[in-house]
Amino acid sequence: MPQSAIFRRNQSEPYYFKERCIIRELSNSELDPAVSIAEATVAVNTSTCWHRLAGTWERYIILAGEGRVELGDDLTELVKKGDTVVIPADTPQRITNIGNENLIFLAICSPRFQPSVYIDLEGDKDC
């Protein structure tokens, strides 16, 4: 039988991820392998690294700030609070904070995010 769980926000310390953003894992557990939820913060005038998630769909739900999301060669759009971005598995992606405050969004991955699915597309030691 599946196990219920409650994950408290204050139990997860934010950390710097090599993608150039701060991550706070809100739900990423073997108890719920179908999905993970993280809060991501991108500083002003910062872009995340070009990357893709192997075999993993991602959704961004913008909570604060303004950004420019780039998905492959096909889509570049401005996003703001309330917008949702759906990113199919294996799609090259990055997001840039173009506003005057931190860009904060939920990153919801299915199946759940694991570091092994993160593929750096820049070849940069910082990504």
Image (spheres, helix red, strand yellow):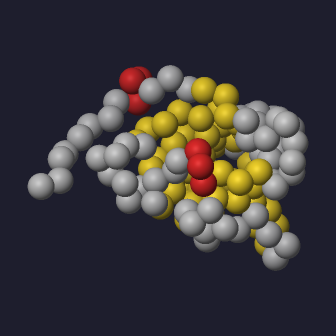
Q: Position of residue 74 (x, y in %)?
A: 82, 76
User: Which quadrant would residue 44 be assigned to in this image?
Assistant: top right
Q: Which residue is pictured at 53% across the width and 47% down the height?
A: 114
Q: Which residue is pictured at 57% across the width and 66% down the height?
A: 55
Whether residue 97 can be seen here: no
The single residue placed furthest to the bottom in the displayed view is 74
Q: Which residue is pictured at 32% across the width and 35% down the height?
A: 7
Q: Position of residue 6 (x, y in %)?
A: 26, 37
Position above or below: 42 against 86: above
Q: Relative to 29, is 18 on the left or the right?
A: right
Q: Identify which residue, 101 or 43, lies in the foreground.
A: 43
Q: Position of residue 16 (x, y in %)?
A: 67, 28
The single residue placed furthest to the left in the displayed view is 1
Q: Position of residue 68 (x, y in %)?
A: 80, 56
Q: Relative to 91, is 27 on the left or the right?
A: left
**Image quarter in which the N terminus is found:** bottom left
The single residue placed furthest to the front in the displayed view is 116
**Image quarter in which the C terminus is found:** top right
Q: Identify which residue, 69 or 53, lies in the foreground.
A: 53
* Number of marks: 0
Whether residue 23 can be seen here: yes
Q: Identify which residue, 21 or 115, lies in the foreground.
A: 115
Q: Relative to 122, is 92 on the left or the right?
A: left
Q: Relative to 3, is 84 on the left or the right?
A: right
